Amino acid sequence: MVLLRIKNERIYGKFKKYLESLEIPFTAEYRLEEDCFALFASPSCEEKVKNAWGKFLEAEKDGEFGAELASAKDELSGESGSGDLSEEELLEEASVEDVAKELLHPSGGAYESMESKAQEAFGSAIMLVITGLLGTVYAGLNIAGVLSHFAGLFSQVLLLAFFLVLLAAGIYTAKQYRTYKKKSEEEAVLLNKINQWMKDNFDRAVLEQLAEENASPEENAVICMDFMAKRLLEVYPEISENAAYQYIEEFYNSTFSSEQNA
């Protein structure tokens, strides 16, 4: 389960060193679709990581992140309706969800499937490899004297180096394609399980219970999809929020919109 999403790389690096100094085991990965570092820990260490995050923020409150912490505390005090909360309690609550936007990455943005990433990487790899190969041959012919479009050894070597860089970039992108393709196959298996779970748990009766009497159909659709996405994240915490909302939207539109139009 994701404990924290940290957008700022500098803050992540500093907190990572702090966890290592405490010898608290954790793992982290960079999530490209969310543009953040997601931190994970085993159930036995979750509280330790959360407590360490609170202490880390407390240590930074008078330092470079002081303004963000003060802002988060002010907002929290206003929401609570009371100024009697202790500084320790404010920091503990803010450390998990309500810390300033610069510290924790907010949800949002479109989710891009691994299949889409694989297709993009494939197209880019083909273009870069072909351009790099043709350019390398072209530069080689100029160096060999067969062609004389570029005079001077320095210009010829520079041209060759440029196309070799393109070729190397194409090879690297081809490796990315293989990685994305493998992940897309795993994603497809997971998505089949998710779709079956949604079919088993969400039907018209469930949506009718969630619908508000005075709300428009569009507003009720948003209310229903929000509820469905939260349920989905509870069952499949390993997927990102953006992915969950996209899966739900696609399922809702294909299942319930077609019922309305029938």
Image (spheres, rainbow, N blue to C red):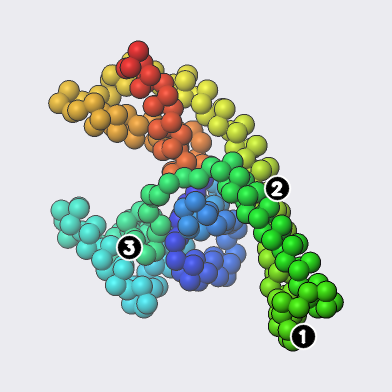
Above or below, 81 relative to 186: below
Which comes sooner in the sequence, label 3 or label 1?
A: 3
Q: Distance between the residues labelled 3 and 1?
A: 56 Å
Above or below, 72 relative to 210: below
Identify the residue shown where x is 46% and y is 69%: 11
| Disc 1: which residue | 153
124 lies left or right of 236 = right
Q: Residue furthest top?
A: 262
137 lies left or right of 255 = right
Instruction: Where is residue 42? Give x, y as percent.
Output: 57, 49
Observer able to see residue 32: yes
| Disc 3: which residue | 100
- Which one is nearer the viewer's eye here, 68 or 42? 68
Residue contact between numbered discs 2 and 1, judged by CB atoms under 8 Å: no
Above or below, 147 relative to 28: below
- At label 1, the amino acid type is Leu
Above or below, 146 relative to 213: below
17 lies left or right of 110 = right
Q: Pointer 1: residues within 10 angstroms few (<14), some, or many (20+)?
A: few
Instruction: Where is residue 253? Give x, y as percent.
Output: 39, 27
- Secondary element at tag 2: helix
| Disc 2: which residue | 178
Which comes sooner in the sequence, label 2 or label 1?
A: 1
- At label 2, the amino acid type is Arg
The answer to which image quadrant residue 83 occupies is bottom left
Which comes sooner in the sequence, label 2 or label 3?
A: 3
Q: How far apart are marks 2 and 1 (CA)?
A: 38 Å
The residue mark sitting in front, 2 or 3, is 2
Identify the residue shown where x is 29% and y is 72%: 67
Instruction: Where is residue 118? Give x, y as percent.
Output: 62, 46
- Which one is nearer the viewer's eye here, 155 or 49? 155
